[in-house]
Amino acid sequence: MKINALIARKPDRFTASPCTVEKIIRLTDVDYDFFSKHLLNYFPFIEENKHLMYCEGDVRHCILVVGENRPDGILVESEGYNYARYAAFVPDAQGLLLLDNLPLDMRMALEAAPQIVEYLLEEMGAPGEHIFSLSDLMERFDIDLKHDIAAQDIVGHALGKRPEIANTEFGDALVITYREPEQAMGPEVGLQ
């Protein structure tokens, strides 16, 4: 996985501020690139939205500026000015926006998928076919794996990324074919 990040040398701490995104400003990629390199310039979109940017207690109310095809974004709190007086780089802002726009049940499935996978792996001790009740999983994780096809896809995808899982199938139950981790790795290469 590759991400863009601001890296500090020998930081003794990071202090984050709680922020509320009041509005999302979408720029063309060219405009976003220019903005990201000239944060102290005057920008009309900041002037037009400066009434949305202020600090209330310890919460900063901001706009989030993103480019059409840029993964990252810039959080801006202008404090009444027409430039980015306070700004923060937000890695993968587009991914955050995508998650925020997903229906609640899909967000819950995405958040629960790693715990579901770990639970299932712990339950499967020996290689072979294992059958799990969808009702039991629903009760344990509060995710409707019986009727919600999107949740099934999310959990199935998470399981499929594990080398020890040979196959998953949703039906009346979740059927998983589990193999020994050594089998999952394939034959060793270069050893005689």
Image (cartoon, rainbow, N blue to C red):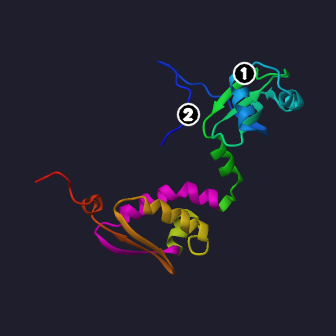
The percent coordinates of residue 56 (x first, y second) are 80, 28
The percent coordinates of residue 39 (x first, y second) are 73, 22
In the image, the segment drawn in magenta is 106-134
Quadrant (top left, top right, bottom left, bottom right) of the C terminus:
bottom left
Look at label 2 and name its amino acid: Asn
The percent coordinates of residue 184 (x first, y second) are 30, 61
The percent coordinates of residue 177 (x first, y second) are 36, 72
Q: Which residue is mark 1?
A: 38
Q: Is residue 38 above or below residue 168?
A: above
Is residue 80 within the magenta segment?
Answer: no
Look at label 1 and name its amino acid: His
Give the side of residue 134 with respect to residue 34, left or right.
Answer: left
Q: Is residue 59 visible?
A: no
Q: Residue at x 68, y 56 (%)?
A: 102
Please state the total of marks drawn on the protein image.
Answer: 2
Q: Label 2 vs label 1: CA separation?
A: 18 Å
The kind of secondary structure element at disc 1 is: loop
* Observer-nearest of 69 and 45: 69
In the rendering, which numbered label is found on residue 185? none
Q: Is residue 14 above or below residue 32?
A: above
Q: Which residue is mark 2?
A: 4
Q: Is residue 115 visible?
A: yes
Q: Is residue 42 above or below residue 160?
A: above
Q: Residue at x 80, y 24 (%)?
A: 78
Determine contact: label 2, label 1, CB under 8 Å.
no
* Observer-nearest of 136 and 161: 161
